[in-house]
Image (spheres, rainbow, N blue to C red):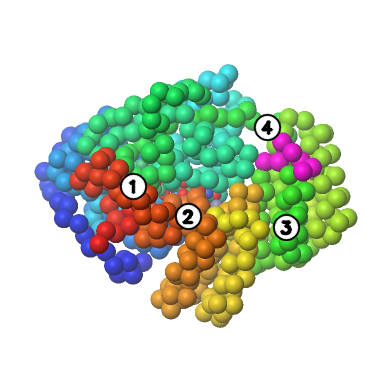
Amino acid sequence: LTPERYPVQRLPFSTVSEEDLAAFERIIPGRVITDPEQLEACNVDWLRSVRGCSKVLLRPQTTEEVSQILRHCHKRNLAVNPQGGNTGMVGGSVPVFDEIILSTALMNQVISFHDVSGILVCQAGCVLEELSQYLQERDFIMPLDLGAKGSCHIGGNVATNAGGLRFLRYGSLRGTVLGLEVVLADGTILNCLTSLRKDNTGYDLKQLFIGSEGTLGIITAVSILCPPRPKAVNVAFLGCPGFAEVLQTFSTCKGMLGEILSAFEFMDAECMQLVGQHLHLTNPVQESPFYVLVETSGSSAGHDTEKLTSVLEQVLNSGLVSDGTIATDQRKVQMLWALRERITEALSRDGYVFKYDISLPVERLYDLVIDLRTRVGPRAKHVVGYGHLGDGNLHLNVTAEAFSQELLSALEPYVYAWTAEQRGSVSAEHGLGFKKKNVLGYSKPPVAVKMMQQLKALLDPKGILNPYKTLPTQA
Ligand code: FAD
Ligand code: MLT
Ligand code: ZN
């Protein structure tokens, strides 16, 4: 938890005064938090890898309140760190110094839902799992799902353009988010909260804020297109003898399952060992070098089960898979999903985690894991690979007893240079935040980086929104 590891200087923002606190108290009476104990949790990230020292937490309930807060902060040159569920993986959700934390936790109201169009409009602080629950009661689902569902907010999801476990089927939030309401750095409310599937009237401004990690504006409300709840969900959990077989299993599933394939995730044997060791989850199949989780979602239970069963027969008979199990009832489906979803948690219990989230050509997805195991040798406890194989997204994680500069130097910039050589992305879905902002150049050309800086200067000329994040430190 040492910010010294990331040499960065506090920019000349003002510090919060008694008058500022009084002004905030007038805007959101009783929701200005200065108690150090209450501030502790929101100063530290989920991974416990970065820590800020903010002395003020603001909990607005309405867009108008967010607007008044930002108007004040802009005028006074006070830096602000927007925070949702604080589950981000790149240190973007916590202050670096004493930035004011603006939490969306109390902005948790559903505004409207239409059951013909499936369009949900809600405030940014709605917890993803609560929205899922709300929709399930109405026979719909959220187009995204992730392991952090119990804590993350929809605003945080949009701000990070989170990918997750349903990306393969429902695509990016860039497609499913139909409208946004955003408060700009100076307090201006930008209302683009439309609920239209088609709208080509000029530039699509909401896209600027999707994935902007709180650096361009504070998202206060979201309009999102939700799919009907699939009547039948089946999950197969399979053990594969090698990565080549994982890839061939993926091709087989795409070919044989067609439109009902809704997820294709993978994990290696070390991940399985870690979820066993730290979370006491049991491996439902024979021990194998790799495991894949295949999900189907469709409207006809019998038809889908039949299809998945014939996939299983085919992959077992051809030796692509050495063992497998299928779940149709909800309890077993959830049990199989937990093996994959809870890897992040198991890793965090293993020690300090060096986390990489990379997009690569799928054929080369696992090469870097093998390469790194040799490179780092016994300096690491574990080098593991898992992730959203169906989306070409590898989660490469290295654990160690504690943070080690020597190990970090073996990993970086090596991992980034390797990724750039494959024309991959150094951040597939987690964003750049504080920890990755200086590696943007591995995946984007200088002209693109400059344009990002110009957009930031245009929308937030004083740089008060989530400073020290996303954009590279300027010389
Ligand atoms: P926070 O962590 O609070 O914030 C994240 C960033 O968004 C910060 O930069 C913050 O300043 C900004 N922000 C938050 N709210 C707003 C707002 N209203 N307006 C403007 N900016 C805002 N990510 C994936 O993509 N796919 C996964 O599968 C996935 N699985 C995860 C599993 C676990 C167990 C965990 C802990 C994390 C996982 N993540 C995953 C990381 C992911 O980015 C977050 O979980 C989620 O999208 C962040 O939402 P949040 O509300 O917690 O945002
Ligand atoms: C996941 O897919 O499990 C998440 O992105 C979190 C992680 O990378 O550990
Ligand atoms: Zn992921």
Residue at position x 48%, y 58% from top? 426
Instruction: Work out whether mark 3 precedes mark 2 in sequence or the reverse, and give the earlier one.
Output: 3
- Residue range highlighted in magenta: 255-262
- Residue 230 is marked as 4
- Closer to the chain start, of discs 4 and 3, is 4
Residue 384 versus residue 400: which sits nearer the camera? Answer: 384
x and y, in percent, of residue 257 in the image:
76, 41
Query: Identity of the amino acid at label 1?
Result: Met
In the image, residue 136 sits, relative to residue 256, either above or below, namely above
**Labels 2 and 4: the sequence-earlier one:** 4
Q: Are marks 1 and 4 in contact (CB under 8 Å)?
A: no
Percent across and percent down for residue 149 are 52, 44
User: Can you say which quadrant of the picture contains the N terminus?
Assistant: bottom left
How far is mark 1 from mark 3, CA to CA?
A: 38 Å
Q: Which amino acid does label 4 sit on?
A: Pro
The mark nearer the N terminus, 2 or 1, is: 2
Is 89 contained in the magenta span? Answer: no
Closer to viewer: mark 4 or mark 3: 3
In 3D space, how far apart are the residues under numbered discs 2 and 1 (Cα atoms)? 16 Å
Q: From the top left corner, tell me how far across and down residue 126 is, in percent.
A: 44, 36
Q: Which of 83 and 180 is in front in this view?
A: 180
Q: Name the residue under label 3.
A: 246
**The one of 459 and 402 positioned closer to us in this rendering:** 459
- Name the residue located 79 percent from the left edge and 54 percent from the top edge: 324
Reading the image, the residue beneath label 2 is 427
Foreground label between 2 and 1:
1
Find disc 1 in the rendering and name its residue. Answer: 452
Say if residue 310 shows up in the picture.
Answer: yes
Which callout, 1 or 3, points at the residue further toward the start of the chain? 3
